[in-house]
Amino acid sequence: MTAQSKDRDLWIRRYHAAEDSDIRLLCLPHAGGSASFYFPVSEALAPRVEVLAVQYPGRQDRRLEPCVETLPELADRLLPLLMDGWTDKPLALFGHSMGASLAFELAGLLEQRAGVVPLMLFASGRRAPSRFREEDDVHRRGDEALLAEIKRLAGTDSRILGDDEVLRMVLPAIRSDYRAAELYRPERVHRLRCPVTALVGDRDPKAPLDDVRAWREHTGSTFEMEVYPGGHFYLTDQAPRVIRRIEDALTGAAADH
């Protein structure tokens, strides 16, 4: 195994190999999230869709590695790893919250530098790249305030929060992710060539519906938006519906590919 392949396997996790699948879906976690968040998605879609999940530095088995400071840098690091064996079949991207902004950056790099047009971009729980807020400052707050914000967004869902002691251990990674997400400004507000589907909870305080609808401005292809009951982590309660929506959209896009 080459050093490049080892690095690729460190960043990109494949929980359920699906060699006969015609489609791959790359999933990008939220701030503080990890690749394992998408294990249920991989399990549900295999073997029809092969799911890949990104493991950022600074968490779980990569907790001793320094976090990547910006979303453009993360996208730059991921691009060559994706090109090393993961683009031989149609590739779609799914990102939740911070992961949606990263998916946008990565889709742009795939199109502009690699000549690979993603099958589709799913942007979940995130306002459009052109709709940033200067008042976003969670990453500058103290530990207790940062924890309070995480709990506010997660509600009472223990699947997201986990153990409070563990949460405190990963606060540096969470803070770094919040900084990357809140300071993210696309160098240019470009239009992707791939279709974009925006997914959002109807009570998400971080993603007002008008700001989510603005994803339409970021594609020269088709745009769809689907609103689900719930807050910022609507997709945990709505997982069966969301997974079915993803599969239906990918199947339709692949048929037209």
Image (tube, grey):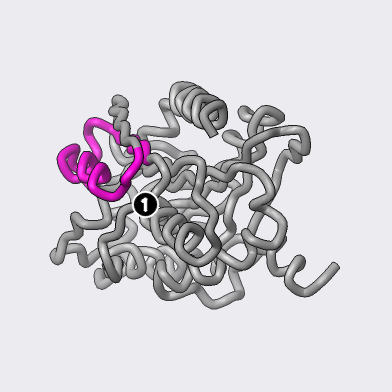
Q: Position of residue 200 (x, y in %)?
A: 30, 36
Q: Is residue 245 above or below residue 13?
A: above
Under circle 1, the secondary element is: loop
Q: Position of residue 168 (x, y in %)?
A: 45, 63
Q: Quadrant of the N terminus?
A: bottom right
- As rendered, which of 115 and 164 lies closer to the eye? 115
Question: Is 232 left, or right, of 3 in this rendering?
Answer: left
The magenta segment: 196-221
Instruction: Identify the residue shown where x is 44% and y is 47%.
Output: 95
Q: Quadrant of residue 186?
A: bottom left
Question: Is 160 left, or right, of 1 in this rendering?
Answer: left
Instruction: Identify the residue shown where x is 27% and y is 67%.
Output: 188
Q: Is residue 249 above or below residue 114?
A: above
Which residue, given by chain and number where applicable, does mark 1 sit on?
A: 192
Q: Quadrant of the C terminus?
A: top right
Instruction: Identify the residue shown where x is 27% and y is 56%.
Output: 129
Q: Position of residue 133 (x, y in %)?
A: 16, 60
Query: Which amino acid, by three-letter code, is at mark 1?
Result: Leu
